[in-house]
Amino acid sequence: MRLLRLLIYILVFVSSLTGFAAKQTSFVLYVNSSFQDDSLGHNVVKDLTNNSINWVNSSKIKLYNSPEKKFIIKSIIGNEAELNVSTLYKCNAVMLVEDWQAKKKYNSTKLKGIIFIKSDAINPNNDELLGYIDCNQTVLQLLSETRPYENLSGNYNFSLLGVLNLHRFNYDIVTKDNFALKTEKDREKVKKRYYSDFNYDTVINTKLVRYVIKTGVNTGSEFSRDIIFRLQDFFISNPQEFYNIGGDKIMEVSNYPSILISGLVVTEVWQCIDGNPIGYIIRVNIEQAGLELNTISTNQFTEWGVFFYDGKTIEQVIAEKKFRWELKQVNSQALNIYIRERVKDHLNNCNWKALINTTYTIN
């Protein structure tokens, strides 16, 4: 088993990180970045590494040299001669120190620490311990407030802590109650015993969907034109309102010196209910010559007195979706033009499992 030498070192100190209670078991999990397939929607190793670098640099958390916590690794902004957080850029695997608490219907977990590693697939003797984060309340709070990078097959409803607690990643269990599981058979036996006990059904599958309403010649274009032209007429008559939402700054970098509303960008969270997609508006941005202005609330349209076909509000118009719209982004992933229509069909038909098979690349 790769990292066994490093594991023996860690086991000496891990007992101080894990507590014991009735029906509670301590584990160390090995998570390699290359083991995280795209169908998961995220790569927890990359998310933990990138966010930890930012948190250390902004002095929100402490990065230690090892679970011993003999000294703190400095911010990358500090003395260049010192060991600094930039060493984490080499990270391609983590070890998660956890306590698992057995409950009636499912297991719950408590994350105790994160060990960052540079794993060498060719020569395990070159494996390198890069740093350690003690998962105190501050760290857990940051993890709960941070969303992972989710590609289009992922679930937007997860926080990074949610991904960790529900074990939505591929991993090996390498120790149980501070005893190394040395064989593949032992590891699989323990994993099979506990894996099915996590409560996966508590998180509703959602997608962040971002699209732009534009004029054109396709189906729904007459409704799109109604939306865009009404906005155009309103802002030409009320240029100060246009400037108030960032129009003046956009016009400075735009090739168009006059007001030209080119689209309305809508960001929603979608769920599938009874086989139908239901969207909940998060924000709206007006486009001037293809460049987005400041985010505005849907209430702003009513305050402006801007209504659309049949006297409908912007919320009603968006809910109906009779207009022409181009898909721009799903979850964290911007979509290229070659897969937008295919992804759009899967979203509209609530065929979300098919998104896993759609051609894309996770960043």
Image: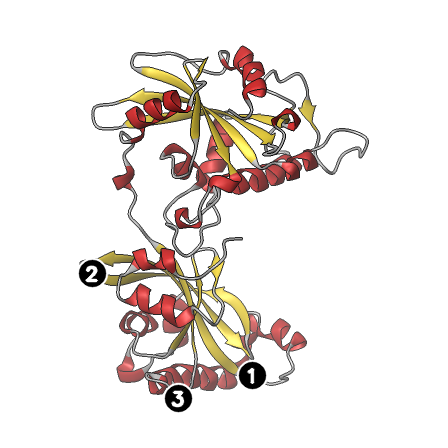
Tell whether 89 sits left or right of 319: right
Callout in the foreground (2, 1): 2
Report x, y in % for residue 148: 47, 45
Q: Position of residue 328 (x, y in %)?
A: 46, 67
Q: Residue furthest left?
A: 274
Residue 199 position (above or below residue 340): above
Question: Which residue does the image show at 62% across and 84% down from the upper left?
Answer: 256
Question: Please, what secondary structure does the residue beneath circle 2 have?
Answer: loop
Q: Residue furthest right?
A: 81
Asked if residue 243 lies left or right of residue 145, the reply is right
Residue drawn 30% across the image and 83% down it: 309
Q: Which residue is mark 2?
A: 275
Distance from disc 2 to disc 1, alpha carbons, whole Å, reads 41 Å
Label whose residue precedes the other's in the sequence (3 or 1): 3
The colour scheme used to paint the residues is secondary structure
Q: Which residue is mark 3?
A: 217
State yes or no: discs 2 and 1 in contact (Cβ < 8 Å): no
Q: CA distance from mark 3 to mark 2?
A: 29 Å
Indicate which disc, 3 or 2, sits on the residue closer to the N terminus.
3
239 displayed left or right of 127: left
Q: Nearer the viewer, mark 3 or mark 1?
A: 3
Q: Nearer the viewer, residue 18 or 284?
A: 18
Q: Residues within 10 Å of mark 1 (few under 14, many from 20)?
A: some
Mark 2 or 1 closer to N-term? 1
Q: Position of residue 177 (x, y in %)?
A: 41, 13
Provide the secondary structure element on which disc 3 rests: loop
Which residue appears at 43% of the width and 68% of the height? 339
Residue under label 1: 259
- Decide if residue 20 is in sight here: yes
Is 325 situated left or right of 349 in this image?
right
